[in-house]
Amino acid sequence: MRLSAIGFGAWAAGGGGWAFSWGPQDDADSIAAIHRALDLGVNWIDTAAVYGLGHSEEIVGRALKSTSHKPYVFTKCAMVWDSKGEITSSLKHIRREAEESLRRLQVETIDLYQIHWPKPDEEIEEGWAVMADLKREGKVRWIGVSNFSVAQMERALKIAPITSLQPPYSMINRNVEPEILPFCLKHGIGVINYSPMHSGLLTGAMTKERVQALPADDFRRRAKNYQEPQLSRNLQIAEFLKTIAARHNVSPGVVAIAWTLHNPAVTAAIVGGRSAKQVEGVSPALSFRLTETEYAEIGDFLDANPAPE
């Protein structure tokens, strides 16, 4: 697959009222955002069954039915829920999950099917074997993993090749740099990183007041990096990015995305959008790249302003 540098992330399209929601979301806005992304040159969409407990996949399916574009469609499995909306991790129901995702997405084949979280750890081999079967049967074209460690990827590779890893990666969360990204580069595993703007913190639009006003069911209210002392440091990074962004007439968020794409292991980045206007704001990331000098400038700033313990 040849991917555009950014893909559309459909997490927020799941709407409100579930454990990891971004708060209420208008379905028409989500569909308009997807259509605008495709019009601007984005050629892949990433969602997951658990987003909105199936709702995000349904919205993606509706958006695909009302556009002439034919993007790649990626989704994820292994986070399942019961009739009460209680979410648990399991790799024992992947075949059933794939059938349900195909139905909600209204597609015949899933382009990239990913294990969302490697939980429970002892079920990885069983789950990955089923993923490989689904690929052989043509229900999915490629299979990948998300949030896996190097050791977990090594175990999966003994069963079947891994097309891609989906890890969190941003200036605020660099945990994958020492081992995971080099491993993927060495083994030819593509990387599509999520949260390159760290869930909105690096967009330049977030403030302490906005954080305080987030809806009660927005998961970010409980996230460590949205609390002090981390919050002040993270907003300081976003302020610094404005200086580089201003040189190129782009937003700080575009600079944050470009910073992740600068790593040679990263194939493309997942960027969420809740409206057509938001999508337009980050669309320059399709082509904008940092110079080596600018990348070093950002590195110096991050080194001088480390995360609080």
Image (cartoon, rainbow, N blue to C red):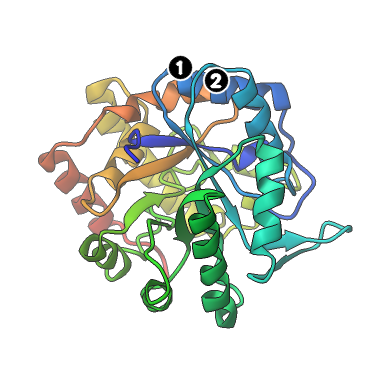
- Could you say whether the residue bearing mark 1 is in a helix, strand or loop? helix
Furthest residue to the front?
137
Give the amino acid at mark 1: Asp
- Could you say whether the residue bearing mark 2 is in a helix, strand or loop? helix
Furthest residue to the right?
84
Which residue shows up at 29% across the image and 20% down it? 249
Q: Position of residue 56 (x, y in %)?
A: 67, 39
Q: Which residue, given by chain and number where applicable, does mark 1 sit on?
A: 39
Judge by depth and name the residue closer to the eye, 92 or 174: 92
Furthest residue to the bottom?
122
Q: Position of residue 133 (x, y in %)?
A: 53, 63
Residue 40 seen: yes
Q: CA distance from mark 2 to mark 1?
A: 6 Å
Which disc, if any, is residue 300? none
Location of the C terminus (image quadrant): bottom left
In the rendered view, tell whether residue 271 sits above or below residue 279: below
Judge by depth and name the residue closer to the eye, 97 or 4: 97
Contact check, label 2 and label 1, Cβ < 8 Å: yes
In the rendered view, tell whether residue 120 sits above or below residue 229: below
Which residue shows up at 12% across the image and 42% down it? 292
Examine the image and state in which quarter residue 11 appears.
top right
Location of the N terminus (image quadrant): top left
Which residue shows up at 49% across the image and 63% down it? 132
Q: Position of residue 198 (x, y in %)?
A: 46, 48
Task: Give the side of residue 180 with respect to residue 49, left or right.
Answer: left
Task: Give the side of residue 85 with respect to residue 286, left or right.
Answer: right
Task: Give the side of residue 199 with respect to residue 149, left or right.
Answer: right
* Mark 1 neighbour class, 10 Å CA radius: few under 14, some 14 to 19, many 20 or more: few
Give the amino acid at mark 2: His
Q: Which residue, given by chain and number where applicable, does mark 2 sit on?
A: 35
Task: Give the side of residue 297 with respect to residue 32, left or right.
Answer: left
Q: Position of residue 186 (x, y in %)?
A: 21, 65
